[in-house]
Amino acid sequence: MGVLISSSILNADLSNLGFELRRAEDAGADMIHIDVMDGVFTPSITFGDFVVKKLRPHTALPFDTHLMVSDPTKLIPLFAEAGSDIITIHEESDCDVAECLKLIRSYGKKAGISLNPETEVQKIFPYLPLCDVVLIMSVKPGAGGQTFQLEAIEKIKAVREEADRLGLNIDISVDGGINDITAPLTFRAGANIAVVGTYLLNSEDMVGAMLSIRVARL
Ligand code: DX5
Ligand code: ZN
C-alpha cells in the first residue's frame, strides 16, 4: 500500500493560496492539510470555515482539516459544509469527543482524532471505533517548521497494534517535522499518511521532495 501526502499550507504564501493549492496538486500531493487554530487551544489564529469555502473551487484534492480549537462542536458543521473531507479534532479539546466524532461522520466526512505530544496514546484507544484517521502530533501544535519528536514513533506503533487488535482499518497520519529522514521512520512504525509543510515549501523542487517522501515507503 502506498502512502498519502497531505500538503500543509500553514507556512505557504497565504496571500496567494489559490496558487499554493495548485502548486501542491501539480507536485503530486494527495490532499491539502488545513491547520485551523482558534487563538485559545493554540496562541495563533489561522483559517476559518470561510477560507475553506473560498479555497474549495481551487483544487480537486480532498481537504484534510485539522481543528486545533478548544471546542470543535459548533465548528464541525461549518467546516463540513465548507467542503472539508477529513475533519480531525483533538483529544485535549474541551468537548464530548465521541459525540464530535459521530457528528463528523453524520456529515459523511472522515473523522479524525489527534493527540498532543504530551498526551498518553492510550487515551485515544476508546475512540478508535469512531475514527477513520488518527493524527499523531510529532510537534507541539501551533507552528510549522519544528523538529520531529521521536516519541511519536512508539505512539504510531501502539495505535497500529491496537487498531489491528480491534480489526479496524484506520489511517495513521503524522504531523510535524516530516521530511525525507523522518517520514521513513513513521511509515515503518505503521503510519500511512504524512502531513508535510516546511520540507515541501522550502524545497527548490517540490516534485522531487514529494517523491523523496513517497519512495521512503518502497
Ligand atoms: C502544527 C501543524 C502542522 C504543521 C506541519 O501545529 O499542525 O500541520 O503545518 O508543518 P511542518 O511540516 O513544517 O512541521
Ligand atoms: Zn496540522
Image: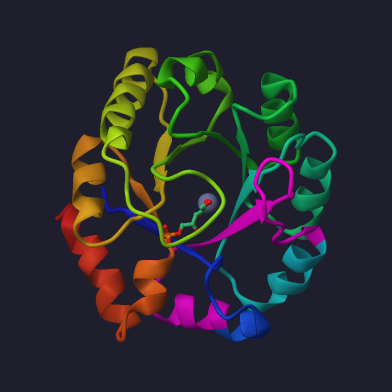
Depth check, front residue: 190 or 174: 174
Measuring from the top left, give residue 31's x and y in whole percent.
50, 62
Quarter of the image where the C terminus is located: bottom left
Number of marks in the rendered image? 0
What residue lies at 70% left-to-right and 72% top-to-bottom? 55
Write down the region rendered in magenta. 20-49
Instruction: Relative to 92, say whether 211 is above or below.
Output: below
Quarter location, residue 195: bottom left
Q: Is residue 103 above or below residue 200?
A: above
Q: Quadrant of residue 161?
A: top left
Where is residue 32 drawn, in percent x and y? 53, 63
- Give the side of residue 140 with respect to residue 155, left or right: right
Q: Residue at x 50, y 16 (%)?
A: 123
Instruction: Tell me which colouring the rendered structure shows.
Output: rainbow
The residue at 44%/63% (across/down) is: 30
Q: Is residue 53 left or right of residue 161?
A: right
Find residue 210 and report its image quarter.
bottom left
Q: Residue furthest front?
A: 43
Residue pushed farthest left?
218
Is 36 colored magenta in this rendering? yes
Indicate yes or no whether the magenta region holds residue 55: no
Provide residue 24's location: percent of width, then percent of height.
46, 76
Eyeballing the image, is 78 above or below 121? below
Q: Is residue 21 left or right of residue 206?
A: right
* Rendered view: 142 above or below 6: above
What is the x, y in percent for residue 71? 77, 34
**x 72%, y 28%: residue:** 100
